[in-house]
Image: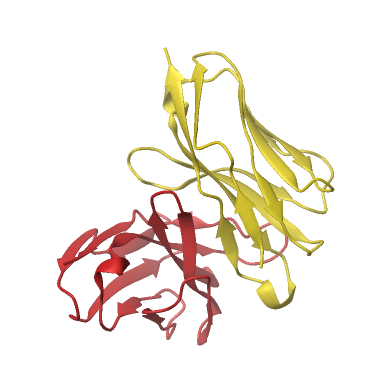
Chain colours: A red, B yellow
Amino acid sequence: EAQVTQNPRYLITVTGKKLTVTCSQNMNHEYMSWYRQDPGLGLRQIYYSMNVEVTDKGDVPEGYKVSRKEKRNFPLILESPSPNQTSLYFCASSLEGAGRNIQYFGAGTRLSVL
Amino acid sequence: AQTVTQSQPEMSVQEAETVTLSCTYDTSESDYYLFWYKQPPSRQMILVIRQEAYKQQNATENRFSVNFQKAAKSFSLKISDSQLGDAAMYFCAYRSAGGTSYGKLTFGQGTILTVHP
């Protein structure tokens, strides 16, 4: 089944404790992206990747890191989480090219930083 | 930077009626994509409809259609014959089709749609 898989689905942590949210897709998509969703703000892009070893900042990259060493994986790293990073996070992927660019989303990760 | 604005935080409609959700955007680009996504209580993001800016014809998907006004930078979603299952948060989104912003995707704030039986 074609899908984007995020883990974990729920995470409670404390300020300053490094964490990684994994994202994997099995559709051979070039493009992958991370978003955070907050009430009244919609989804905001954190980082995106056009292909392996190619990443770029979205609108809210501060406090986050990403890497794209393999095409299928795009982990989101919070080196020192803070309470303002409490949010709902989504990973998404898509094929690139004319007539494509339709993003498939993971199920979301609810993160609470205490 | 591109911005997307959904000016209706909440909308409601009677079952079987028609409702239109508004979206405006600001960009200096000529080539881009526009999307409407649906987010039901399960939180899953589901693509509803997609429009390419170079196409003048409005996109349609069954009961869903858009009114794309490129000059006015408007992209509204019309839902016909509304069903209870249409109740969700709806997001409008913009994506650059090239240039230095290629890959960036901007969402609006969302509109909560309630469907009354």
Total numbered badges shown on the rendered structure: 0
Q: Nearer the viewer, residue B58 or A89?
A: A89
Residue B38 image point, x, y percent: 49, 41
Q: Is residue A106 visible?
A: yes
Image vertical order of residue B111 relative to residue A20, above or below = above
Residue B6, quarter of the rendered image: top right
- Comparing A17 with B49, the one in front is A17
For residue B54, side relative to residue B86 (left or right):
right
Residue A2 x %, y %: 43, 56
* Quadrant in which the C terminus of chain B is drawn: top left
For the point 48% across and 62% down, the residue is A44
Res B62 seen here? no
Which residue is rendered at x = 73% and y = 62% of the image?
A98
On the image, the x and y values in percent for residue B36 come to 58, 44
At x 42% / y 86%, what residue is drawn? A69
Q: Quadrant of residue B2?
A: bottom right
In the shown orientation, is residue A39 left or right of residue B17? Answer: left
Quarter the N terminus of chain B occupies: bottom right
Say left or right for B52 vs A73.
Answer: right
Residue A102, placed above or below residue A60: above
Q: Nearer the viewer, residue A46 or A74?
A: A46
In x, y percent, where is residue B93? 59, 52
Specify the quadrant of the image occupied by residue A6: bottom left
